[in-house]
Amino acid sequence: MIKRKKIYIEALRILAIFLVLFQHVPAFDYYLQDTSHVMGHLFFTLIAKINVPLFLMISGSLLLNREEGYREIFRKRMIKIILAILIFNFLVYLAENQFVFDLQDYCLGVFENGIDRSYWYLYSYLGFLVMMPLLHRIAQKMTKNDFILILFIHFVFSTIEPLLQWFVPTYLGQSFEFTWAFRIPFSTIKEIFYPLMGYYIDRKIHIESIHKKKLAGLGCLSLLGILISMFFTIWIGNQEGFSDEYLELFDYVSALSAFILIKSFFVHYEAVIPAWISQKIVLLGSVTYGVYLWDPFFRKLFFDGFDQSMIPWVGGFFSSVLWCICSFLVCGILVQFLKRIPKVKSLF
């Protein structure tokens, strides 16, 4: 089983799902209210922001190398996502409404963006799957210059533009909003940008040839981006009130760096990692999608009681962290059980 799995991909999945779980608990937004711990809470918030980019990069790496038609994509992938949307929104709807069901209310919730907003990624992923055959052809032809250009354009729209929209009113004394009409989808839409980045980094960059100094530089660049985002969030927050407007200034830098650093670690050290650890990584990685699906249901049922009982002992932040660990274990065990049921296992 280990030989058929890329250990670093499974490790990236585990990291990404923990960050997803963390983003869905109150600790993610504590910095908005608890200014006494704003630095620590904000730092972890910015780390958590790389969760969806990592999942999209993994999808790009694994799927854009495959030549599949729309019929095959629908049969193998889209129907699975559509069923997950219907089933798990239904379960969350029941949990949210004391198991009283209203069909019209449920249907409206599903089509609006999900009964639980945590499921927005399923809708987003459907969009990626619709684009997959086209993105496959684009990815196969990508060159180093294409990669740099797409990354640079993303830098302009994700970093330079938000800073301009703050700089001009602040220092030039007039309102300013960069035109909405000029957008470049390959760089500005996450469902296109991150899969292409993941494909190129994983398939066309030889990680083995990257010097340790460059890897250290990537880590420093990510930290610098996090610190700049923290600076603007805190500085402007103290003047105008805290918001998440500047949390994604450099999230792409952190996401791309995390992908490269984790892949580099496993490429260089996988041979000396004990087989049982590799097996556990593969096992945990295999349940991450199921954990994502089940967590909102259990969170609706049990989180408030869990949080209230734990806060007096460990505080709100660590209570949320403990929930992430417990939810992963409980949901992971449930998913492993369900995978043994023939008619159900394909859903996960």
Image: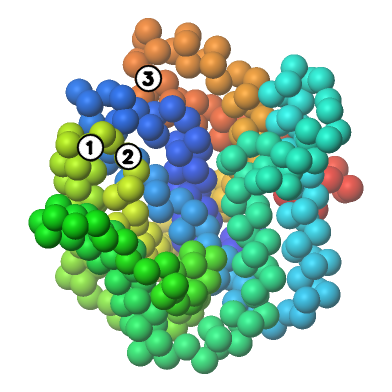
Image x and y of residue 47, in percent: 34, 47
10 Å neighbourhood of mark 1: few (<14), some, or many (≥20)? few
Kindly indicate whether the residue at mark 2 contacts the one at mark 1 (C-beta within 8 angstroms): yes
> Is residue 146 shown left or right of residue 74?
left
Q: Amino acid at mark 2?
A: Ser
Q: Between 151 and 166, which is closer to the camera in this rendering? A: 166
Give the residue number, with chain letter if any, for mark 2.
243
Of tags 3 and 2, which is closer to the observer? 2
Residue at 68% in and 37% down: 115
Label 2 sits on a secondary structure element that is: loop
Give the residue number, with chain letter if any, for mark 3.
316
Q: Between 29 and 326, which is closer to the camera in this rendering? A: 29
Residue at 81% in and 20% down: 100
> Is residue 300 shown left or right of residue 170?
right
In the rendered image, the vertical position of residue 280 relative to residue 302, given as above or below: below
Image x and y of residue 200, in percent: 45, 79
Residue at 50% in and 35% down: 24
Give the residue number, with chain letter if any, for mark 1.
240
Q: Amino acid at mark 3?
A: Gly
Measured Cα–Cα span from mark 3 to mark 1: 25 Å
Instruction: State the residue lying farthest toward the left.
Output: 171
Measured Cα–Cα span from mark 1 to mark 2: 9 Å
Measured Cα–Cα span from mark 3 to mark 2: 20 Å
